[in-house]
Image (cartoon, rainbow, N blue to C red):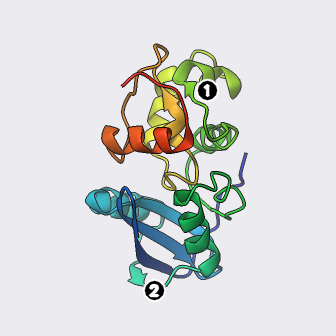
Amino acid sequence: MPPEASSPIDLRLDRRLTPVGETLIVTDETGALRAFDFVDYEARMRGLMARHYPGLDIGTGDAPKSITSAIDAYFQGDLNALIPLVWKTNGTAFQRRVWAGLCTIPAGTTLSYQGLAAQIGSPSAMRAVGLANGANPVALIVPCHRVIGASGRLTGYGGGLERKAWLLRHEGASFIA
């Protein structure tokens, strides 16, 4: 499980075009990724950042080249390009366990909420896993899009189901639309 992130001194927002729309990349003064989301969900992302880092404004600034290059490489087909990125998040211990569990789901595969709950040692916590999955501040990098319903059908995704389907197809994962 990733350790709880210390509070950053500075947050910077960069924007980047991808095949699934404009993205928001929030980094701190060390270059660590604090948030990744889609522009049509900017209000939600800003609300989450305000809860995690009260009183800290998000300025504008370029994300480190290592992050933008990894994002570009992922969308160009290097499905493992995001793995080495450094991300720091606040959240409960349970949320951080779920987010660490998400990082074990390889590109091209999916896992059900029930499967993820079992994997993190909380087999009856499917709803709590779903809530933690939905509160993931670093979408795509912590691959919450790889969690689907037990039936193999797509279920909720903070970036929208159309985007989730695109990402899973990009990775070659099987699912029921």
Residues 150 and 175: in front is 175
- The structure residue drawn at horizontal position 39% and vertical position 78%, both measured from the top left corner, is 57
Q: In this view, does 125 lie above or below 94?
A: above
How many discs mark residues in the rendered view? Answer: 2
Q: Name the residue under label 1.
A: 116
- The structure residue drawn at horizontal position 46% and vertical position 69%, both measured from the top left corner, is 25
Q: Name the residue under label 2.
A: 61
Q: In this view, does 153 lie above or below 157?
A: above
First-in-chain label (1 vs 2): 2
Number of residues whose C-alpha sits closer than 10 Å to that of mark 2, classed few (under 14), some (14–19) or many (20 or more): some
Q: Where is residue 19, by image quadrant?
A: bottom left
In the image, residue 102 lies at what x, y percent? 62, 39
Report the disc number at residue 35. Answer: none
| Amino acid under disc 1 | Leu
Residues 84 and 121: in front is 84
- The structure residue drawn at horizontal position 41% and vertical position 43%, both measured from the top left corner, is 166
Q: Where is residue 90, by image quadrant?
A: bottom right
In the image, residue 149 lies at what x, y percent? 45, 21
Number of residues whose C-alpha sits closer than 10 Å to that of mark 1, classed few (under 14), some (14–19) or many (20 or more): many
Distance of mark 1 from mark 2, alpha carbons? 35 Å
